[in-house]
Image: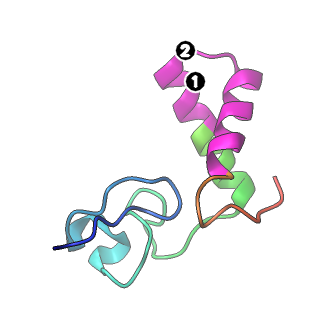
Amino acid sequence: MTMAVSCESCGMPLAGAEDHALSDPAIPYCTYCAPEGTLPSADERLERFTQWTMRQDGLDYAAAREKARAYMKTMPAWKDAAM
């Protein structure tokens, strides 16, 4: 049985090599979070998550930022990041 793998930054399912950054299954991040193979700073990623949350949920900036921050804290890549 194959264990499901998810991006350690955003939680996106990583179904195949093409979903991993640089199409490298050894990289635990998706191609959207780490297009160059490494993650951006926590602040940069928080801003991207905030903008995405505003679009997806129709929230204002402050509410979207708090929701994004709370979600990021649940992800392995960001659980100890200062945000």
Quarter placement of the N terminus: bottom left
Circle 2 — which element? loop
> Which stretch appears magenta?
50-72
Residue 6 location, x and y as percent? 38, 62
Q: Are there few (<14), some (14-19), or many (20+) residues within 10 Å of tag 2? A: few
Q: Are there few (<14), some (14-19), or many (20+) residues within 10 Å of tag 1? A: some
Point out which mark residue 35 bears: none
Task: Give the CA separation, mark 1 to mark 2.
Answer: 5 Å
Query: Is 56 on the left-hand or right-hand side of 24?
Result: right
Toward the front, the furthest residue is 1
Q: Is residue 39 magenta?
A: no
Amino acid type at image mark 2: Gly
Residue holding disc 2: 58
- Image height check: is 62 above or below 70? above
Residue 7 location, x and y as percent? 43, 62
Residue at 67% in and 32% down: 67
Residue 49 location, x and y as percent? 58, 41
Toward the right, the furthest residue is 82
Amino acid type at image mark 1: Met
